[in-house]
Amino acid sequence: MPKVTVTEYVSLDGVFEEPGQWSFPFWTDEVAKWKFDELHAADAQLLGRVTYEGFAAAWPTMTDEAGFADRMNGMQKYVVSSTLTDPSWTNTKVISVDAIRGLPEENILVAGSGRLVDTLFREGIVDELRLLVHPIVLGSGRQLFHDGLPTTSLTLEDQQTFSTGVLALTYRRPAA
Protein backbone atom coordinates (compact mmCIF):
# COMPACT_ATOMS: atom_id res chain seq x y z
CA MET A 1 0.00 0.00 0.00
CA PRO A 2 1.37 3.45 -0.81
CA LYS A 3 2.19 6.01 1.86
CA VAL A 4 -0.59 8.63 1.86
CA THR A 5 0.35 12.11 3.08
CA VAL A 6 -2.25 14.83 3.61
CA THR A 7 -0.94 18.41 3.38
CA GLU A 8 -3.05 21.40 4.33
CA TYR A 9 -2.91 25.13 4.96
CA VAL A 10 -4.87 25.86 8.16
CA SER A 11 -5.60 28.88 10.31
CA LEU A 12 -5.19 28.83 14.09
CA ASP A 13 -8.91 28.11 14.39
CA GLY A 14 -8.71 25.12 12.04
CA VAL A 15 -10.09 26.69 8.85
CA PHE A 16 -8.63 25.32 5.63
CA GLU A 17 -11.19 26.69 3.17
CA GLU A 18 -9.90 29.02 0.43
CA PRO A 19 -6.34 29.48 1.75
CA GLY A 20 -5.48 31.67 -1.24
CA GLN A 21 -7.63 34.36 0.34
CA TRP A 22 -5.81 34.43 3.70
CA SER A 23 -2.42 32.69 3.49
CA PHE A 24 -0.72 35.03 0.99
CA PRO A 25 0.58 37.57 3.57
CA PHE A 26 2.51 34.72 5.21
CA TRP A 27 4.10 33.32 2.01
CA THR A 28 7.91 33.49 1.87
CA ASP A 29 10.69 31.88 -0.13
CA GLU A 30 11.22 29.45 2.76
CA VAL A 31 7.57 28.33 2.65
CA ALA A 32 7.82 28.05 -1.14
CA LYS A 33 10.88 25.80 -0.81
CA TRP A 34 9.08 23.61 1.76
CA LYS A 35 6.12 23.18 -0.62
CA PHE A 36 8.47 22.61 -3.59
CA ASP A 37 10.38 19.89 -1.74
CA GLU A 38 7.12 18.30 -0.58
CA LEU A 39 5.70 18.13 -4.11
CA HIS A 40 8.90 16.80 -5.61
CA ALA A 41 9.12 14.03 -2.99
CA ALA A 42 5.68 12.74 -4.01
CA ASP A 43 5.11 10.21 -6.78
CA ALA A 44 1.48 11.15 -7.38
CA GLN A 45 -1.34 13.34 -6.16
CA LEU A 46 -4.69 12.17 -4.82
CA LEU A 47 -7.50 14.71 -5.03
CA GLY A 48 -11.18 15.05 -4.37
CA ARG A 49 -13.34 16.23 -7.25
CA VAL A 50 -13.78 19.83 -6.06
CA THR A 51 -10.05 20.37 -5.50
CA TYR A 52 -9.29 18.61 -8.77
CA GLU A 53 -11.62 20.93 -10.68
CA GLY A 54 -9.96 24.01 -9.16
CA PHE A 55 -6.46 22.72 -9.85
CA ALA A 56 -7.34 21.57 -13.38
CA ALA A 57 -8.72 25.00 -14.19
CA ALA A 58 -5.58 26.78 -12.99
CA TRP A 59 -2.42 24.69 -13.24
CA PRO A 60 -2.31 23.74 -16.95
CA THR A 61 -1.73 27.41 -17.88
CA MET A 62 0.87 28.13 -15.18
CA THR A 63 4.62 28.26 -15.62
CA ASP A 64 7.50 29.08 -13.31
CA GLU A 65 11.28 28.94 -13.48
CA ALA A 66 11.61 26.62 -10.49
CA GLY A 67 9.61 23.81 -12.09
CA PHE A 68 6.72 23.61 -9.60
CA ALA A 69 4.10 24.02 -12.34
CA ASP A 70 5.83 21.45 -14.55
CA ARG A 71 5.75 18.97 -11.67
CA MET A 72 2.08 19.69 -10.89
CA ASN A 73 1.11 19.24 -14.53
CA GLY A 74 3.33 16.28 -15.33
CA MET A 75 2.90 13.98 -12.35
CA GLN A 76 0.27 11.26 -12.02
CA LYS A 77 -3.00 12.47 -10.49
CA TYR A 78 -5.85 10.37 -9.09
CA VAL A 79 -9.29 11.83 -8.44
CA VAL A 80 -11.74 10.12 -6.12
CA SER A 81 -15.15 10.92 -7.59
CA SER A 82 -18.45 9.29 -8.40
CA THR A 83 -19.47 12.07 -10.82
CA LEU A 84 -16.32 12.95 -12.78
CA THR A 85 -15.94 10.66 -15.76
CA ASP A 86 -13.63 12.37 -18.26
CA PRO A 87 -10.81 14.28 -16.56
CA SER A 88 -9.09 16.77 -18.86
CA TRP A 89 -5.89 17.46 -16.89
CA THR A 90 -2.85 15.53 -18.13
CA ASN A 91 -2.06 12.23 -16.35
CA THR A 92 -5.34 12.11 -14.41
CA LYS A 93 -7.31 8.98 -13.62
CA VAL A 94 -10.62 8.73 -11.75
CA ILE A 95 -10.64 6.05 -9.03
CA SER A 96 -12.68 4.89 -6.06
CA VAL A 97 -11.57 5.04 -2.41
CA ASP A 98 -11.20 1.25 -2.48
CA ALA A 99 -8.59 1.54 -5.26
CA ILE A 100 -6.25 3.75 -3.22
CA ARG A 101 -4.61 0.86 -1.36
CA GLY A 102 -3.67 -0.76 -4.68
CA LEU A 103 -2.03 2.27 -6.31
CA PRO A 104 1.49 1.56 -7.60
CA GLU A 105 3.12 4.81 -6.46
CA GLU A 106 4.98 4.79 -3.15
CA ASN A 107 4.31 8.36 -1.97
CA ILE A 108 0.94 9.95 -2.62
CA LEU A 109 0.19 13.55 -1.67
CA VAL A 110 -3.32 14.82 -0.87
CA ALA A 111 -3.89 18.58 -0.87
CA GLY A 112 -7.14 20.36 -0.03
CA SER A 113 -9.89 17.83 -0.72
CA GLY A 114 -11.67 18.14 2.62
CA ARG A 115 -14.38 15.53 2.05
CA LEU A 116 -11.78 13.08 0.75
CA VAL A 117 -9.55 13.73 3.79
CA ASP A 118 -12.52 12.91 6.05
CA THR A 119 -13.00 9.65 4.17
CA LEU A 120 -9.29 8.81 4.28
CA PHE A 121 -9.22 9.30 8.06
CA ARG A 122 -12.38 7.21 8.48
CA GLU A 123 -10.82 4.41 6.43
CA GLY A 124 -7.46 4.60 8.25
CA ILE A 125 -5.62 5.43 5.02
CA VAL A 126 -3.70 8.55 6.16
CA ASP A 127 -0.09 7.78 7.10
CA GLU A 128 1.17 11.34 7.53
CA LEU A 129 -0.44 14.73 8.13
CA ARG A 130 1.41 17.93 7.30
CA LEU A 131 -0.11 21.18 8.48
CA LEU A 132 1.08 24.66 7.58
CA VAL A 133 -0.51 26.47 10.53
CA HIS A 134 -0.90 30.18 9.82
CA PRO A 135 -0.93 32.78 12.61
CA ILE A 136 -4.41 34.04 11.84
CA VAL A 137 -7.85 33.47 13.35
CA LEU A 138 -10.53 33.62 10.66
CA GLY A 139 -13.60 33.15 12.82
CA SER A 140 -15.54 31.29 10.15
CA GLY A 141 -15.02 28.93 7.26
CA ARG A 142 -14.84 25.23 6.65
CA GLN A 143 -12.89 23.38 9.31
CA LEU A 144 -10.40 20.71 8.28
CA PHE A 145 -11.79 18.09 10.67
CA HIS A 146 -15.45 17.38 11.35
CA ASP A 147 -17.46 15.74 14.10
CA GLY A 148 -17.73 12.00 13.79
CA LEU A 149 -14.17 11.20 12.72
CA PRO A 150 -12.64 8.29 14.61
CA THR A 151 -10.10 9.11 17.28
CA THR A 152 -6.72 8.95 15.57
CA SER A 153 -3.47 9.33 17.50
CA LEU A 154 -0.56 10.81 15.61
CA THR A 155 3.05 11.40 16.59
CA LEU A 156 4.77 14.73 15.93
CA GLU A 157 7.74 13.87 13.72
CA ASP A 158 8.95 17.29 12.60
CA GLN A 159 8.31 20.96 13.15
CA GLN A 160 9.62 24.04 11.47
CA THR A 161 8.91 27.70 12.13
CA PHE A 162 9.04 30.18 9.26
CA SER A 163 9.87 33.87 9.61
CA THR A 164 6.22 34.93 9.21
CA GLY A 165 5.10 32.74 12.11
CA VAL A 166 3.81 29.87 9.97
CA LEU A 167 4.45 26.50 11.59
CA ALA A 168 5.06 23.41 9.48
CA LEU A 169 3.97 20.44 11.59
CA THR A 170 4.45 16.88 10.39
CA TYR A 171 2.53 14.12 12.20
CA ARG A 172 2.72 10.39 11.49
CA ARG A 173 0.50 7.51 12.39
CA PRO A 174 2.40 5.34 14.89
CA ALA A 175 3.46 1.94 13.60
CA ALA A 176 0.83 -0.68 14.38
Image (cartoon, helix red, strand yellow):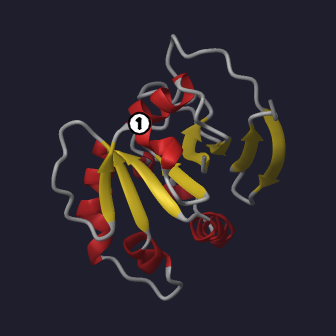
In this rendering, would 76 be left or right of 82? right
Compared to 29, does 118 lie above or below? above
Q: Residue at x 71, y 50 (%)?
A: 168
Q: Amino acid at mark 1?
A: Val
In this rendering, would 55 be left or right of 139? left
Q: Residues within 10 Å of mark 1 (few under 14, many from 20)?
A: some
Compared to 91, does 95 lie above or below? above
- Residue 67, percent from left and from top: 50, 83
Q: Residue at x 31, y 62 (%)?
A: 92
Q: Quadrant of the C terminus?
A: top right
148 vs 44, nearest the viewer: 44
Residue 17 shows in this picture: yes
47 vs 31, nearest the viewer: 47
Q: Residue at x 16, y 55 (%)?
A: 86
- Which residue is labeled 1 in the image? 97
Compared to 68, does 130 lie above or below? above
Q: Residue furthest bottom?
A: 65
In this rendering, would 131 be left or right of 24? right
